[in-house]
Image (cartoon, rainbow, N blue to C red):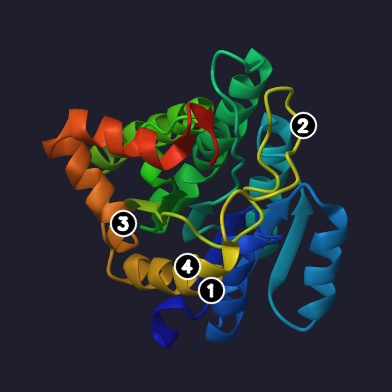
Amino acid sequence: MNNFFNNKIIAITGGSEGIGKSLIEMLLPLGAKISTCARNKNKLEELQLKHTNEFLHCVVADVSEYNDCKLFIESTILQYGGIDILINNAGISMKSLFVDVDVTVIKKLMDVNFLGAVYCTKLAINSIIERKGTIVGISSIAGYRGLPGRSGYSASKFALNGWMESLRTELLHADVNVMWVCPGYTKSNIRNAALNDKAIAQGESPLDENSLMSAENCARHILHAIKKKKRTLILTFKGKQTVWMNKLFASLTDKLTYRFFFKNGKLIK
């Protein structure tokens, strides 16, 4: 893996924590030149200070804003001369039944999870094509199976998967690999930061975070898949099981999914 990522210019959105941060921590020792963006200025500054003597370029940016994405991508190309790999990792979730949710929550999830990837990829695509690089989207099992209480999240991830499949087909003969990753439940801050029905972070996770796949382990799988130029990466046995069950036994999967997320008719997860 060392030789593959050495001197590669890699842009990662949402790099201040979770999977994005783990990717950065693994890639820098391999000789990669990293550019990352996030909304949290303090966390980015901490990351930058930790890696002062390494190739790390940090930009405060909200990927739901086109001009922020433009600043991030253009400053990356100016800093390093191009982009070999773009990892669209930034994302947010939600927890609310659709009947209760404010539609601004749905819009926010689409803006960050889907349009953020579209903006950054559009701005970087000419450089990636020129360098015969890789475009990655961090999706979710929710992009294959709609999840109750996460209607906006599922919508954004379904959109991401469909768009990336279209893009992969368009670039089939350009020697550019397009890959989407569905990690399943991974230990991170995404559930604590998930928006409730009023677009406010819920501040807690309904799951036992310690029992979930670590962000480091997830990042390791992603880097291996990038090197192997895989089309898709579905992690965890439960994730693969859900995808195939939904394809083969959709009605049964409806019932099993309801049973997992609800108790006595109330959303619990």
In this orientation, does residue 223 appear?
yes
Q: Is residue 229 above or below residue 59?
A: below
The residue beneath circle 1 is 216
202 sits left or right of 113 in the view: right
The residue beneath circle 2 is 200
Check contact, mark 4 vs mark 1: CB within 8 A: no
Report x, y in % for residue 269. Answer: 53, 42
Report x, y in % for residue 196. Answer: 68, 30
Quadrant position of residue 259: top left
The residue beneath circle 3 is 238
Report x, y in % for residue 7. Answer: 52, 77
Q: Which sits earlier in the primary sequence, circle 2 or circle 1?
A: 2
Amino acid type indicated by mark 2 = Ile
Q: Residues within 10 Å of mark 1 (few under 14, many from 20)?
A: some
What is the secondary structure assignment of the residue under circle 2?
Answer: loop
Check contact, mark 3 vs mark 1: CB within 8 A: no
Calculate the distance from the C-alpha at mark 2 to the C-alpha at mark 1.
28 Å
**Nearest to viewer (mark 4 / mark 1):** 4
Check contact, mark 3 vs mark 2: CB within 8 A: no
